Structures are given as C-alpha cells and as structure tokens.
Image (cartoon, coloured by chain):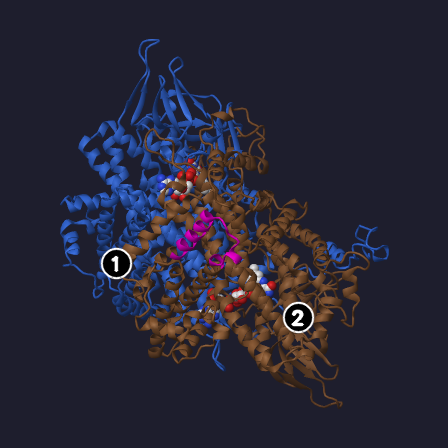
Chain colours: A blue, B brown
C-alpha cells in the first residue's frame, strides 16, 4: 500500500501533499528574500545553495536514512571515508578562493614555501571551505566535529599559541591546514579535569641537558580523556600540560606531541591510546583517551608565542622562562572561541532543519474533527501553534546574531595576530584587542550556551509535536537530539559559560553604576549598560511598553537592568556570587536573548542589510520577531513580574493577548517560513518533512526500504517463542511436583 | 592506570570513594525507614529487595554495560531470550501467590478448567509478577514493554471488553495470562490515526451468511502502525476496527485476530506484517505494521461485553447490534488505564535510578578551588544544588501518589468487573463505578503526563550535571533518555491527556461554582473544588502562606482555584476551550503537583503509614517535600504572581529565600537520600554511580572492558588516512594543471 502497492492508493483519506503544496502556492511571501535575509546577503545565499547542492549530491558526502540503522563501527568507517573525500574539496575551495588553478599547484607551493614569502592562508581563503564544513555539520554533525577538531581546535590552538614560525611550520609546511601530512587532535580535557583547565595534571618537564620536554601522565585522573580523533585518526595532539622548568610549575601551556607515525599510523613509544567507546551521539567521532609514559619532544614543540623557555647559554646553567601573563590568558581563550562562535551558527542551521520537519508535519497531519467535518490540520489547534511556532522562530532569531558574531570573531582575531606579530607589534593595540577579546568572550559564551540550549528544546518540542512519528529514527529527531546535546557540554559547559559571562556582565553593571562605560567597545551588545539608560530605568523614567517594534528588544534591556540591580543588592548582602548562581545563569540567557533581538532588529530595520523589499514579507519577519520576544517574556513572566518590568495585570492584559493574537497570524505563513530555510530533502533525511509533502507514502516507503518485508520467512525469534508458548508445566503433577524439574517441550 | 595498571594508583589525587563513603557513614539518617516509606511498607520493601536481587543475579535477565554497544538485531534477540525466561518466573510467581506447588500443576489446571469453576487469576495472584515486571522495566525498559503489550494491553483489552466467557477463554484456556499458547499484541494505532481513536479506518464487516467478520485495511493510512510485538513475536492481535453490520457503521469495537500460527509462527493468509524499524529507543521491542487483506474471523472473536452482534434467527434475515453506549465508552478507557497507572510507578523507579547517579557523581566529583585549597565537590556549589536536588526530590514525590493510584486502579477495576458480570450485575453500582472510572481517568491522565515529563527532565538535567561523563553511553543517561521519552507520547500523548483532564477539571470547577460537589467521589484529589474552599479563595478569605507544613500543598490548591477562575472567565468571553489550551495543559500539571504533594503529606503525616520513626529522618523527608513545592512555585512564579497567589515581593522575600535556605540543608543528606532507593549497581549500570563511589576506576575499567586496547594494531581507518595525508597534489603543475586529473599517491 505504498506507491508500489496493490491497494487503491486513491482511497487514501488524507492528502497531506495537497495541504502543504496548497499553502505554498497560496502564499505571496517572498521565500527567496527571506533566504537572503537569513543567509545574510543574496550573494551568500547563492553560495550556500550551491554548496548544499554539492553536498547532497556527492556520492560519499551525502547522507541518507540508512544512517539511522548504523552502529558505531559503521559510523566510524563512514566518517573516515567522508573525511578523506573532504580533503580534496578543501584544496579546491582554497584554489577557488585564490583563483589559482593553473601554472603551479597552490597547495604544494604553500607547503614548500619554508621562508613564508607567500601570504599565508587567511579567513578569506578558507571562507568557502569553512562554510562547506558548517553546512556539512547540518547533514552529519559527527563529520563536522571529527574534522573540526583537527582544523579548528588543533589548528586554532597553534594559531593562538604558536609563534609565527610555528604557525607556518605546523599549518603550512607540515600541511595540516590542507589536511595533509599530519592530522591533529586537541588534548585539553583529562579524566579528572574538564572545566577547570588550570588544574590539569599532565606534566611537561623541561630537560636542560637535552633541551627537550618529557610528557608524563602522573596518574589515572591525568589521562587525557574524550579526545576527538585520538582513538583512530590523529597523528599529533596539541597537549595542555603543566610546564615544569627547574622544578618550578608555570601552569598550563600547550605542546605539539606526535602520537602516531603519519605513514604507518603506529603509535610512538610511550604513547598509550584507547577508545572511550560508545556515546549518546556522534559515534562517528573516535574519541579516545591518551596516557603519556615518558614521551620526549624537542623544546621547539612547545607553542611559544606568549611563553618561552630559554635554555641556559652556559652548560649546566639554569634555564629561564619568559611569559606575558595577560596575553597568555588571551591565548587560552582563543582556541575555544572559534568553536563557540561556530556553535551559534550551528544553532541556526540545525534548528532550521527541525523547524522544517515540525512545520510540514503540523500542516500535513490531520487529527480530530467535529462530527461531519474533515479532520483539522494539527497546526490549526492553538495549542499546536503555541508548541510549534515559537520553535520555528528560534533559528530566525539566531541567524543575524550568528553572522554578526562570526564577522566580529574574524576581525578581532586578525587584529590580535597583527598586533602581536613581531614585525607589527603594537602595545596599545594589544591592550585594546585584549578588551575586545574579553567582550567577545562574554558574548560568545552567553550566545553559545543560550542557543545550544534553545535548539535542544527546539528538537525536543518538535519531536513531541510529531507524536509517535517523531520517535521513529527515520524522522531524524532521535539522532538529531543525541548528536546535538553535547554542544551544551563541550568546549565550555553551558552552565560554566553562563556563570562566567554573567559575572562579567555584573561587573560591567557595577562599573556603569559608577558612571564607567566604554562607548567604543561596549556600545553594541552592552548598550543597556549605558549609565543614563540604567539611571532612567532605575528611577522609573524608562518603563516597559510594547508599542513600537524596538520596544520588543528594549523590554529585555529594561529587564536586564532591573535584574542586575536586584542581583547587585543580593550580592551586597551575601558577598557571595556563588549563592546567586541560579540567577546569574538567567542573566546570561537574558543577555543572549537581548543580543539576538537587537541583531535581528538592526538587520531587518535596515533595508540595505535586510535585502527584504516585499512589504508582506517584511511584516511577517517583524511578526516573527515580536513572537519570539513575547514567547520568552511569557516564559519568563516570573522574572518580569518579580523585577517589576510588568505588573501581573500587564502580563494578563498585554503580553499574553498580544502573543496569542500573533500565533494564528504567523501560522498562515508557516510553510513559506520554513521553505525559506531552503534545505533540500537530502539535508533533512526525515520523510515526514520532505518538500513534496507526501508524508505517508514517503515515510512508509522509507520504512520498507530500510526494513524489507520477507513474508515467507518466520521471524528471528520464532523458535524461542514457539518453545515458550508450547511448553509443558514445570513440575509434572503425577509426581506430586517433586521429580521432573526440567521443562518439557511438546516439540 | 586502572586497578590493574602499571602506574601507582596511590598518586591519584581525588578519592571520590572516600567522599561518598564518608558522607554515608557520617549520617544518622535511617535509610531503611526511608526505603519502607518509598516502597509503601516494610513488607513491600522486603519483597521489592528480594525481587531486585533475583533480577540482577539471573544469568539471562540481568543487564550489564555491554547493552550500550548493542544494535537493534542484538537488542531484539536479547529481549526475546529474556521474555522466554520470564515466562517461567511467571508460573512460579502465580504458584507462590497461591501457595500451590504440589499435588496438581496449578497452571495446567487453570488452563483445563473450561467451565471456570476455579477462581480466575486476580490481582493478588499476579501481584508478585506485576512487581517483578515493574522492577524489570527499571533495568531494561524495552523488555518491560515487549511483555507489557501482551499481558497489559492485549490482556486488558480482553478483560475490559470481553464477556466473562471470552475472558476465560483467551486468558485462561488459551493460556495468554500465563504466557502460554498465544502471544498478543495491541492493534489500536494506525498510520493515519493515533490520538483520534474514533476515526480509525480498519473495517470489520459482518457476514451474515457465514456468521463471521472480514477484517480489511482499506488504504495505506489504515495500516496498523507501531504495533509492539507485531513484527516478530505476536500470534494474535486485539484489533480496534469499525464494526460494520448490514451496511451500518457502529464505530470502533475490538476483535481478536489471529496473525500467526503459534506452532510455526507463519503468518495466516491475508495478514501482511512488516517491521517499522529503528526507533529513538527501546529497539528490543519489535514494533510493526499490519495490513489485513480479507481476513475472516468467527463472530465470537469480537469482544462482546458491551456490544453484541446478534445473528438473525431466520435465514436471510437482518443481523442486529445491541450496545450499551455508556459502558462501551468505559471499556475504551480500561485497556489504556493500566498502562498510564503503571507509567506513574515507572516514573518513581526510573527517576530514582538517575537520581542516584547524579547524586553520587555530584558528591564524588571535585572541580575548581580557591588557591591552595583542595577542589570543591560539585554538590557544594549552590548552582549544582539547585540543578541536582530538586531532581532528586522528584521520585520522592512520585512514590506515594503512584502507590495510591495503583491501589485505586485495582479496586475500581475489580468493582467494574463485579457489577458488570451477569451473575452480580448491578445497575446503580455500574453508574457509580463509571463515575469513579472517570475520576481515575482524570487523575491518571494528569499524573501520567506530568510525571513522565518530569522524569524526562530529571534524566536530562542530571546528565548535564555530570558534564562530559554524562554523555558517555556507559553512564546510562543517553539510553535512559532515549528509552524514556516515548512514555510522553504513547498510550495517550501527554498534551492530549493534559487537555482532556484539564477540561474535565474545568467542568468540575464550573459545577462547584454552582455548589455542586460530590464529597464521596471527589474528596481526595479534587478537594480543592469543595465550594466553601473555592468561595474562600475567591473572596480573599483564604490566602496563601507557607507557615505550616500543609501550606506547601495548600498553596497549590489556592493557585488552582485562582487559575481555574481566570480560565473560566477567559472561556466565558471566547467560548472556545481550544484557545486557552496552553493554560489547560498547565492546569493539568498543577493538578498533578497538588495530588503528589497531597499524597506525600498524608502519608508522611500519618506515623502508621509512613513507617518513619526516626526524628531526623522525618525532618529530612519534610524538607524534601518543602523543597519540591518551593522549586515548582519558583518555576511557575509567573502564574503564581499573575493569578495573585503571591505578590512579586513575596516571591523575592519569602518563596525564594525559603527555597535557597533549604538547598544546603538537604544537600547534607544527599547520599543517604539516594542510597535509600536501594538500587544495586546491577540495576544502575552506570559506573560513575556505583555504590562504592570509586568513580574513576569503575568508569575507566568499564571503558576498557567494552573497548579493549590492542596497541599493536593500527586503527581501522589507518589506510584511508595515510593515503589522504600523504597524497600528492591534484593537478600536476608541470602540465599547467590540465592533464593529470586523478589523484597520485606516494604509496
Ligand atoms: C563527545 C565529547 C567530545 C569531547 N571532545 C574533546 C576534545 O576533543 N578535546 C578535549 O580536550 N575535550 C573534549 N571534550 C571534553 C569537554 O570539553 C568537557 O567535557 C567539558 O569541558 C566539560 O568538562 P567536564 O566533563 O570535565 O565537566 P566538569 O568540569 O567536571 O563539570 C561537571 C558539571 O559540574 C558543573 N560545574 C563544574 N564546576 C562548577 C562550578 N565551579 N560551579 C558550578 N558548577 C560547576 C558543570 O556545569 C557540569 O555540569 C569532549 C567531551 C565530549 C562529551
Ligand atoms: C514506540 C511506540 C510504540 C507504540 N506501540 C503501540 C502499540 O503497541 N499499539 C498501538 O496501538 N499503538 C502504539 N503506539 C502508538 C501510540 O500510542 C501513538 O503514537 C500515540 O497514541 C500518539 O498518536 P499519534 O502518534 O498518531 O499522534 P497524533 O495523534 O497524530 O498527534 C500528533 C501531535 O499532535 C497533537 N495533537 C493531536 N490532536 C490534537 C488536538 N486535538 N489538539 C491539540 N493537539 C493535538 C498531539 O499532542 C501530538 O503532539 C506506539 C507508539 C510508539 C512511538
């Protein structure tokens, strides 16, 4: 009874494809304009579309529903195949960006250029490939990570901590930037320490006599743990270890440690590696543990941009350590910053995938009716609108802030590289960039935490909104959730990140109360801390309303000020930030929501940036904005009332009615709104969410394809079951239940 | 570097086992008394402990960490083996309950007793086995369900809809109650209809000439879908289908339809069955789809307690249908009621498992310290207390209401059976029992929905509280979540259940406003609707406070009344219940929270029922009660303020301070509080949560055991990776990048 079935297909009562297509054709919303808005410009939109097409049509990179039946070993092998395929795309992408295909081979040239005469790879050179990777994350997150650990974490650790020569050597000469020569992993976390990097226990002891370091794992707890790539694929590891020189402990520094011979993949002596085994998700990543038993590396393998070990010039003399503490700290941030910034982008893309599935099923699925009527589409139930529409709004509100953050990350890192390079060294520049980095850290921490949490909720809520079908692996929610949620834990646990960003915000608030505010650095995401605004809020001159569009951002600014003021008073009494940690986590969330609304508002409010010309489309995009703001005000109405942003009656009479009014309006455009993400079926891999809307046939066919029926066969457990069902009694009663103690089968 | 490692174990910095054991020995809390409180009595506690021991030591029923690496086929086979093992336990358990082991074989006797002279199996006969099943659900939920579909859903469908003869025939004679003879599945859901049972499309058309029915699946959407047991194990199915007699559609009735020959397991003609494949969790259950192509069954296979087809007495005459509409409806409930009631019990047990893991890790794990100090235990961070302790309180608050609900379910169903049996038929009794059933339906729907949601949250929050270790499959959270969350969807989707229970509560509220309240039926869980109380709340005579212990329940009663009053006004205006559906879902949650607090209060307040004599232990249990109430007031402070139960200042000055005061107090006893669930390691299967507290060694050993290290080996992807890393460039530059288009490898 599928497309190829014997039963009359026409008798099918529901026609979800007609409903979905009908809504599509009946709408005047300009889906292309929305897509340009979401992808940040028409040019980038076209680039994204071209890359997506390449991915879903590549015979090795594409992913289909067979992935849902795969176990860990198969996922591992598949991911490895994809990585080796991706290496070829990388070369192409770099050559495309540099428009250099002929004459010489660009990659070979870059590798041979030992004197660094050629301009090194920069963000522009990598922009195509980086986007390809970000899109691949959407179809197969484990692939994105298994490569991302090498290119992102390992590479950025070197970029952030290495001297220019070291950067050139490892990334260019050795080829790691081109996925050639060596393959890196990132060895920070240990079994005993994750969030508390400062207390890692792996030791790198300097040996003056041989001008080398010895890497040592002192005990079980110091085992490097969770290291992506370590179990199978990595040849090198950027190891976070305590620098010990002349008996003194200088704290955590970074070292490049060879693990395996890149030609044979055999482990080097002293290196012990194991697989940490099955995980909730992303089993295609070969996370491993590493122990070092007296592993020796040259001094030059310590990354030395900000800290150097200086051998004694006289034999037997003492080695010295030179360090720039402030910069050293910055460098600590930098390796992880990239991941956090990218996770905000992932939140946009991954969220959009589930928004599509949830929306199409909600429109195509019918259930319940008043007598005599045809059954209602789920999305016409107000409850379903409440459950689904705000979740669809989430990726909309993530997109502008994600692109903004990425740009800011690139420009700040470029600046850091420049002012800290010997040739262009600039002391004042360094101090400015270090404050910019600090702000970037606050914003990215709060946005990473908030958005990865929001998307967990998106997946979870939308799965439930699809009823039983949401629980079928073939509809993507299960694996999606399992793969996604680790984003809330790794590269900075969300609670830790929220705490640390909120603590910084609270400090900024205290400064603002003393009239201190740096307009040049803080004016964007921290504008609610401008002293006049803070004063106006706290004296009641500035009050919350929802009449103008920008009010929907501003209420969050007002809420933040009142919230921070409440917190500051509590801390004044308790003198203990930890005791208000629950509230601090919320402050970070409010800060992120405010940044998201602000970035969205600024973008949509500027015709030049929004690329939206159609009036109805623009109105819809403003409705999404208002919906998002209202949904979270309602969700946090506890805080909004407690801190007297709104009175109880304003919640009942303004916030909630406005919110409930919007839902049916936005509902009208749910299909164009999700079509506008422009993800092809091959990137969705969930038959209840495919474009044609033929939900039931698509789904049933998928099930048949992955689970072919062989009716002649008896089921796998038949033997066991027939024996069980036809068993005789346990004790034969003629013997008074005492002799025959074993089971007798009829057969 | 494990127990069997070469590196000095003593150098291990952290000693989590000392911390955990220290807290255990340093506490005077009476863990045995708490366990009796949780298990509802000392006798039941002992029974539970004995059964748990049997389960974790049974060579086939026990489950270990190897389960986390298993794929669907292995999980299926393992579950089938466990089922056939369980069949033997079942006989024993029935014989034990009846104290009948000698002389005759009880099971054979019951099967042979075609005249039903012997008393049929009752709840007492099955009590041991039912508890065994409930405990098994905790260690391996898929096993519980794969059996539960047969014994629970299939069996209860027959019990609720069959005549006494049919009940006797199918359950006793054919042996299905003893897991003999036949194995049933439950065929309600179709691809096109889940929640809306009334619109199912499978047809059972009466054939007067042969006095039979023909079962027919008219189209793809009418395919029976999700049917647990259908793919592999079932021989029979209780099918929900439209009864068509003489061209008239009588709506949905139930039929027993043979699917496979119990001796050979071959499918009967006309029956098409397939596997619905991989699911987010519980892959050991063989969920399948079924299509009927002209399948003929005798008229007697329709379950006819409340609806009968009466063949014409004259050849060629018209068949008639006799039905008792009111009872017919009740019978619809009854098959699903048992599942819902059991899911509340599951919530207690499953939640407790994760509470243990989260608690032990929180006490044993240390992270961060002020300079020079040893690192803090996670649980000493106020944020961690906030994240962990309320989640531990959840299973505590579920237990009393779960036991109460189970008792009420058994007694009500016994009553229904009695008053609707021909020999003891009682018209008035029937009308009373039907109202009792209705109340049971409201309570069980609201408790099932609320508690399955709460436990999803328990698992998710506690996983995050364990950082990276929570994401390792071996620590149980991943599989636990994947297995658990379907409880929010099946046997009544949580949102649908919440809506329907809240709608009934709102009706009761309206009645109460008119002075109508049935003290004999409604006095327990609906006591907040007593007209004088409602009046007192709405006139402001009764206001919320938190001075007495019972106030912590009463505030919820007050909140419910105000909430319902707000709702009633909204509905008065809109005349549309659907438009306030979001609020209705919350009403159902508030109702459940109130019932949980109420049941807990009543139990702990009565020394006879609580079995708690130790004063410190009692205080602790009251602290848990207050903590739970305050946590949810704070979580719902939006509603509490909006409906003016508390003012914003009361939230800031009373609720939150009281709540934050309790956290460090309860924290002191977190180890005894979770030890008190008395789950052995074999039921936890998460090395970071084992009793001895030796977190790191247990965990690392588990990983080594499931992923043995063979260092001599090169990793599985080595070939691919060496080829990739050592590849030459794509286009050979001497040819200007135009000739050699294929990759050249060095090797
Ligand atoms: C799949 C996966 C892959 C990974 N890949 C890598 C990799 O390639 N390289 C690498 O180096 N690492 C990797 N990690 C490690 C990851 O970065 C860490 O898990 C993460 O940093 C959290 O550290 P932790 O697990 O030790 O948690 P902990 O730091 O032990 O924290 C545990 C819990 O306690 C809470 N907590 C801790 N301290 C405090 C405090 N002071 N106040 C309040 N609460 C606190 C946290 O919020 C958390 O919930 C990976 C992890 C996973 C799960
Ligand atoms: C693993 C698994 C095993 C199962 N085993 C069995 C089995 O053995 N036998 C069997 O018969 N069934 C079985 N089921 C089916 C299960 O009972 C149904 O999935 C469940 O009843 C929900 O129905 P549905 O999936 O059709 O969702 P739908 O009814 O389509 O609902 C989809 C969504 O829409 C919402 N919705 C629906 N109607 C309304 C409305 N009027 N107002 C507001 N919102 C609405 C729901 O809340 C839900 O979120 C199983 C399901 C699963 C996942």
The magenta segment: B603-629
Q: Secondary structure at mark 1?
A: helix
Task: Tell me: residue A118, above or below residue B200.
Answer: above
* Front one among B38 and A729: B38
Of the residues under marks 1 and 2, which one precedes in the sequence? 2
Tell which residue pokes out farthest to the right in this image: A734
Q: Is residue B607 magenta?
A: yes
Residue at image mark 1: B649
Point out the image quarter for the N terminus of chain A: bottom right
Q: Which residue is mark 2?
A: B158
How many other residues sit within 10 Å of disc 1, few (<14), some (14-19) or many (≥20)?
Answer: some
**From the Cβ of disc 1, is ligand 1 less than 8 Å away?**
no
Q: Quadrant of residue B14?
A: top left
Question: Relative to B213, is A565 above or below?
Answer: above
Q: Which residue is more in the foreground, A121 or A348?
A: A348
Circles 1 and 2, Cβ within 8 Å, touching? The answer is no
- Residue B349 % position (x, y): 54, 53
Residue occupying image coordinates x 31% and y 38%: A122
User: x%, y% of residue B484?
Assistant: 52, 55
Q: Residue furthest top?
A: A315
Residue name at image x 39 percent, y 64 percent: B554
């Amino acid at each position: 009874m599928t497309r190829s079935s014997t039963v009359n297909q026409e008798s099918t009562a529901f026609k979800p494809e007609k409903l979905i297509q009908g809504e599509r054709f009946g709408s005047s919303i300009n889906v292309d304009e929305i897509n340009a808005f979401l992808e940040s410009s028409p040019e980038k939109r076209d680039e994204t579309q071209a890359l997506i097409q390449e991915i879903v049509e590549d015979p090795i990179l594409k992913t289909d529903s067979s992935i849902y039946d795969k176990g860990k070993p198969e996922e591992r092998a598949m991911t490895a195949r994809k990585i080796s395929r991706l290496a070829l795309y990388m070369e192409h992408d770099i050559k495309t960006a540099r428009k250099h295909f002929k004459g010489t081979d660009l990659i070979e040239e870059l590798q041979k250029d030992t004197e660094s005469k050629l301009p090194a790879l920069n963000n522009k050179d990598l922009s195509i490939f980086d986007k390809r990777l970000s899109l691949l994350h959407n179809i197969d997150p484990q692939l994105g990570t298994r490569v991302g650990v090498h290119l992102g974490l390992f590479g950025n650790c070197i970029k952030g901590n290495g001297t220019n020569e070291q950067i050139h050597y490892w990334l260019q000469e050795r080829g790691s930037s081109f996925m050639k020569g060596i393959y890196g992993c990132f060895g920070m976390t240990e079994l005993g320490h994750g969030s508390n990097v400062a207390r890692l226990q792996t030791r790198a002891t300097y040996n003056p006599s041989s001008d080398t370091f010895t890497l040592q794992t002192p005990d079980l707890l110091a085992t490097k743990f969770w290291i992506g790539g370590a179990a199978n694929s990595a040849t090198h590891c950027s190891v976070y270890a305590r620098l010990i020189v002349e008996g003194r402990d200088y704290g955590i520094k970074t070292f490049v440690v060879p693990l395996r011979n890149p030609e044979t993949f055999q482990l080097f002596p002293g290196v012990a590696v194991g697989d940490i085994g099955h995980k909730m998700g992303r089993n295609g990543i070969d996370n491993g543990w590493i122990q070092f038993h007296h592993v020796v590396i040259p001094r030059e393998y310590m990354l030395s941009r900000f800290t150097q070990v200086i051998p004694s010039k006289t034999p037997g003399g003492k080695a010295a350590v030179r360090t720039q503490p402030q910069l050293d700290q910055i460098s600590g941030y930098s390796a992880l910053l990239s991941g956090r910034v990218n996770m905000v982008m992932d939140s946009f893309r991954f969220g959009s995938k589930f928004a599509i599935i949830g929306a199409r099923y909600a429109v195509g699925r019918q259930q319940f009716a008043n007598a005599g009527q045809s059954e209602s589409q789920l999305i016409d139930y107000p409850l379903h609108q409440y459950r689904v529409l705000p979740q669809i709004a989430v990726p909309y509100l993530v997109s502008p802030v994600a692109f903004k953050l990425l740009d800011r990350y690139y420009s700040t890192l470029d600046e850091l590289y420049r002012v800290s390079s010997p040739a262009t060294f600039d002391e004042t520049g360094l101090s400015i960039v270090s404050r910019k980095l600090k702000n970037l850290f606050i914003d990215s921490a709060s946005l990473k935490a908030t958005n990865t949490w929001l998307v967990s909720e998106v997946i979870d809520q939308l799965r439930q909104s699809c009823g039983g079908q949401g629980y079928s692996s073939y509809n993507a929610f299960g694996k999606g959730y399992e793969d996604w949620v680790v984003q809330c834990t790794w590269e900075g646990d969300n609670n830790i990140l929220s705490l640390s960003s909120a603590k910084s915000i609270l400090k900024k608030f205290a400064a603002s109360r003393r009239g201190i505010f740096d307009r040049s650095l803080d004016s964007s995401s921290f504008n609610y801390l401008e002293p006049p605004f803070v004063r106006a809020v706290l004296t009641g001159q500035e009050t919350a309303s929802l009449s103008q569009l920008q009010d929907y951002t501003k209420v969050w600014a007002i809420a933040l000020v009142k919230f921070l003021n409440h917190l500051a008073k509590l801390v004044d009494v308790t003198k203990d930030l930890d005791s208000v940690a629950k509230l601090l986590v919320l402050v970070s969330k409010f800060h992120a929501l405010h940044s998201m609304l602000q970035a969205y508002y600024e973008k949509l409010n500027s015709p030049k940036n929004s690329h939206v010309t159609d009036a109805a489309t623009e109105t819809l995009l403003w409705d999404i904005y208002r919906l998002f703001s209202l949904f979270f005000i309602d969700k946090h109405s506890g805080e909004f009332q407690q801190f007297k942003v709104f009175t109880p009656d304003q919640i009942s009479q303004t916030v909630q009615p406005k919110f409930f009014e919007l839902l049916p309006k936005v509902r009208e455009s749910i299909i164009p709104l999700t079509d506008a993400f422009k993800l092809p079926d091959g990137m969705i891999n969930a038959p209840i969410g495919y474009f044609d809307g033929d939900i039931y046939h698509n789904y049933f066919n998928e099930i048949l394809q992955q689970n072919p029926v062989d009716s002649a066969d008896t089921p796998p457990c038949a033997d066991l079951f027939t024996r069980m069902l036809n068993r005789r009694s346990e004790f034969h009663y003629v013997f008074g239940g005492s002799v025959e103690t074993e089971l007798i089968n009829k057969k």
